[in-house]
Amino acid sequence: MYLKNQQEKLFMLDRYKRNITYLRISVTDRCDLRCVYCMPEEGIKLVRHEDILSYDEIIEVCRAGVELGVRKIKITGGEPLVRKGIEYLVEAIAKIPEIEDIGMTTNGILLEDHAHKLKDAGLMRINISLDTLDPEEYARITRGGDIIKVFRGIESAKKAGLNPVKLNTVIFDKDDNEKKENLIRFAEKNGLEIRFISKMNLQNGEFSIVEGGTGGNCRICNRIRLTANGFIKPCLFSDDIYNVRILGAKEAILKAIEFKPEKGSKSLLGNFYNIGG
């Protein structure tokens, strides 16, 4: 890993010459849904509130990342909209001059009430999880979620100008072409972009390149992750972590870049709900 300045542009290269410019931030392990591919039915052991990074600590990590070349931020969870005052964090990140792109991934349940406030705070775009258009199937997958709230959230995001509005769809059966075609038509009709994500397994190391995106393509991966309880992860499919409270934000990021693997393997310790996917 090394840094260089070329025509006033900062490069943060890992050992495989990938320029790391993207930081994904999990702000909470809490969620208002219990999706079958993310959480066990009985729930999870939640991180203690005092172990969750404060917004000011997260902002400090963002500033350290920017000093090293980070230009893109994605806010995730759990479900980021269940954390109170999320607009404060968005506004603070958006005020960092070097940030070029700030987005969020949400399940959309609470988005109707937040979309315009998020846009006013500086959020640029949003990804909304939607695995089916069928209300009963949606309730089964999410263990009780109301798809009508998601549809309202999508409309609010469009009206607020959070462009592009992207749908994230988990595919359980690769041969389920009818489901994919229905979702593609829905996206086209409503001016949305859509990405299909094959169901992943952290413990078994099962993942593939996202259809309609770049996630899962290790050769060009430019991202690192900050967990809700303060660890920088160089790779979703790795158990390497670096504590920002112990090492300091800048040193934790540098360690993550230095030891970012060439490709993902598996993670025996991580879970999607507290890493951010």
Image (cartoon, helix red, strand yellow):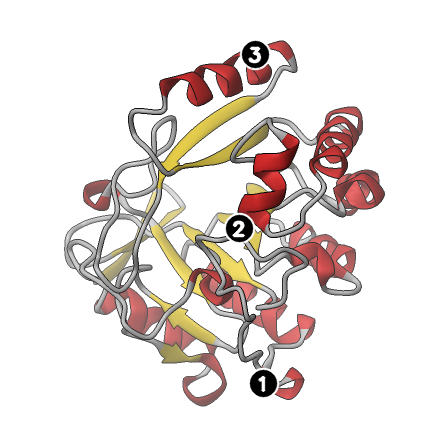
**Location of residue 31 (image quadrant):** bottom right
Q: Is residue 91 left or right of residue 37?
A: right
In percent of width and height, residue 23 lies at 46, 55
Residue 260 in view of the camera: yes
| Disc 3 residue type (three-letter) | Glu
| Disc 1 residue type (three-letter) | Asp
Q: Measuring 71% from the left and 55% from the top, which residue is drawn there?
A: 81
Nearer to us in this view, 122 or 211: 211
Q: Judge depth for marks 3 and 2 and give the one in front.
A: 3
Please tell me how crowded label 1 is: few (under 14), some (14-19), or many (20+) other residues with Cα within 10 Å: few
In percent of width and height, residue 162 lies at 69, 31
| Comes first in the chain, label 1 or label 3 | 1
Q: Is residue 156 left or right of residue 209?
A: right
Q: In which quarter of the image is the N terminus?
A: bottom left
Residue 103 in view of the camera: no
**Location of residue 190 (image quadrant):** top right
In percent of width and height, residue 35 lies at 53, 53
Disc 1 on helix, strand or loop?
helix
Q: In this view, does 142 lie above or below 77?
A: above
Gap between marks 3 and 2 measured at Cα: 26 Å
Q: Measuring 25% from the left and 41% from the top, which residue is drawn there?
A: 208
| Disc 2 residue type (three-letter) | Ile
Q: Is residue 165 above or below residue 207?
A: above
- According to the picture, the residue beneath numbered tag 1 turns out to be 51
Nearer to us in this view, 131 or 16: 131
> Any mark on residue 73, and which?
2
- According to the picture, the residue beneath numbered tag 3 turns out to be 188
